[in-house]
Amino acid sequence: MTDIFATDLSARAAAHSHHPQQLSQLLRNLSLNAGPKITLRDLAVAMEDRSFGAFLVVFALPNLIPLPPGATFILGLPLIFIAWQMFASRRARIWLPQRMGDYAFDNTTFFVFVNRISPWLQRAETLIKPRGWFLGSRFAERLIGLLALILAVVIFLPIPFGNWLPAFALAVIGFAHTERDGIGLIAGALIGIISLAVAASVVLAAGAILAFIF
């Protein structure tokens, strides 16, 4: 009986490793189990080795809505900070400075936020789900981190019409990383490469126009 019980536990652990908890459920569980306040460090700990992707999603999504001039400087810096760690850090999870990690918000507000985005997340989870995961080493993750870093720098730069597509690519990459979806990650990387080509075309066109005028 003990052997059967141990075998069952091992099977469940293996299933969990191949099918990690979905982001929508993870966020809901965090809110239900936390106290009156939730810090960014609590969120990073809950995400464990999926924290890079989760934080990419959090800071990439605001760049997908119309923003006033200069907003990308504010929203682009956290993306650069996250992507740089994904590329250069020896850790498999995000590291937050003490002041940033201690930043807290009301659990009630967080719960309302989770409830609002859960339908969107659940629809996305029908498309992006655990499959074909190939980032089995830190080296492979560094390669994705390098692409994410380049995309984050492009978002940070004031390139006309050059921010939305890289931000969308980072959101897809981040969500796929969180859900352990290799196919989604490849799709996000392809979108990212296309967005870099578009941004380069915009810069070259702007340079040609300026050279013609002056």
Image (tube, rainbow, N blue to C red):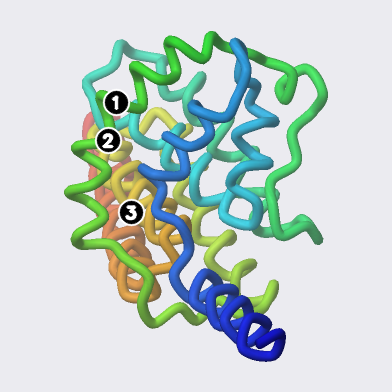
First in sequence: mark 1 vs mark 3: 1
Residue 172's tag is 3
Q: Secondary structure at mark 1?
A: helix
**Residue furthest front in the image:** 1
Q: Are marks 1 and 2 in contact (CB under 8 Å)?
A: yes
Q: Position of residue 164 (x, y in %)?
A: 27, 38
Callout 2: SS:
helix
Identify the residue at horizontal 29%, vertical 54% (top origin).
195
Q: Which residue is found at the position 78% from the left and 57% from the top?
A: 91
Between 137 and 165, the one nearer to me in the picture: 137
Q: Is residue 45 left or right of residue 131?
A: right
The disc, 2 or 3, on the residue closer to the chain's N-terminal end is: 2
* In this rendering, position of residue 2 left or right of residue 128: right
Crowd class of label 3 (few under 14; some 14 to 19; many from 20; radius 10 Å): many
CA–CA distance between discs 2 and 3? 16 Å
Q: Residues within 10 Å of mark 1 (few under 14, many from 20)?
A: some
Front of the two marks 2 and 3: 2
Please name whichever residue, 4 or 80, is drawn nearer the observer in this view of the structure: 4
Label 2 sits on what residue type? Ser
